[in-house]
Every structure is written in C-alpha cells, then in structure tokens.
Amino acid sequence: MIKMSGISPEIKSKLGLVQVYTGPGKGKTTASLGLAFRASGRGLEVLMIQFLKPPQDYGEHLAAEKVPNFTILPLGLDHMMSKVPKEKDIKIAEETLQRAKEEIYSGKYDLVILDEINNAMSWKLLNPAEVVKMLKGRPDNIEIVLTGRGAPAEIIEYADLVTEMNMIKHPFDKGVKARVGIEY
C-alpha cells in the first residue's frame, strides 16, 4: 500500500487548468470521480458540486465520506424522477453557481468539479458567459472540471482540456435500467 502525506508545493504550483468532460456517452461524472480519487490520494483538497443531482443515496456520496480530502455538495433538483418547473430550476442553478464561486474563490480547494454544469448551461438554466467570467476570476492554482452533456462553445473555447464521451452501445438500449453501484 502506498501512503502519501501532505501536498508538495510543486504539485500545487502546476494546478490551474480547466477541464471539460462532455458528450452523449456514459462516463463524464465517473471520469471526474477518478480524478478526484487520484487528487485526494496526493493530498489535494477536492470539492465536487453537483448541479442537477439531489442529496440522495448516490454511490459517490457514500464513497466520498470514506475518502480523505473529498467533499461532495449535491445542490441540484431531482431530474430523474420528476419534472422540475423551469423557474425553480433556474433559481437553484443560479444559487448553485454562486455557491460554487464562493467555494472556488475561498482558496480551500485545489480541485473543484462542477458536475452537470454543462447540462445546466445547455438547458439555459445558466449563462455560459457568467460561468466563463467566474472561471477567469478564480484564484491561481485551482484546477476546475466541468462535466455534463452539451458543453457550450464558449466553455469549450475557454477550457484547456476537452474530452467528449461518445456512446457506441449502452445496456439501456436493451432495457437494462440504471443499476445501484454502477450508474449511481
């Protein structure tokens, strides 16, 4: 077993990029969780803010409780089981963006994941220009990851890394429902 203690200044000095995981395929949140796990293992402080996921029994919430230096804030509404009124959705998304800005600007975190923020922008719940403005004003050496389908052109242009997940085949096509421990 490899044990790391503390964070070296060299690691922190190389942080500060913006990464985007987008596209219609499965794996965007999962990829960001892998990055969170790796960063936490190196002693980085990690925060995941979930825009469109409520505080329910998701596997990542249970795992984060066991991983040092890793916090998840599920601040969204339940889009899987119910229809959400657009006005309420916009209000919650804007409040979540404000909370994200406060947390990013606090300097407490080395890596901040804005889970499903791309969906919030593509659904017109958030203005991409406001998100870019928030990203431009952030403190140095804070790595940011934006996940979700439909990343707007402004976000793709601003980002340092963009990965598109494409679906070639999915068990949903055969009627397999989301499974505990795999999809959530």
Image: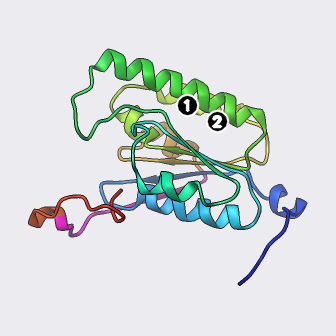
- Residue hosting label 2: 135
Residue at 57% across, 55% down: 64
Q: Position of residue 11 (x, y in %)?
A: 81, 63
Decide if residue 11 is on the left or right side of residue 95.
right
Read off the magenta span: 160-171
Which residue is at the far left? 174
Q: Nearer the viewer, residue 43 or 25?
A: 43
Residue at 36% across, 56% down: 184
Q: Position of residue 84 (x, y in %)?
A: 27, 25
Residue at 31% across, 61% down: 180
Q: Nearer the viewer, residue 167 or 161?
A: 167
Q: Position of residue 46 (x, y in %)?
A: 67, 51
Q: Position of residue 159 (x, y in %)?
A: 57, 48
Indicate yes or no whether the magenta region holds residue 110: no
Q: Residues within 10 Å of mark 2 (few under 14, many from 20)?
A: many
Residue 131, label in figure? 1
Asked which secondary structure carries label 2, the reply is helix
Decide if residue 141 is on the left or right side of residue 84.
right
Q: Given the image, on which type of amino acid does mark 1 rest?
A: Val
Q: CA distance from mark 1 to mark 2?
A: 6 Å
Name the colour scheme.
rainbow
Quarter of the image holding residue 140? top right
Q: Nearer the viewer, residue 28 or 71?
A: 71
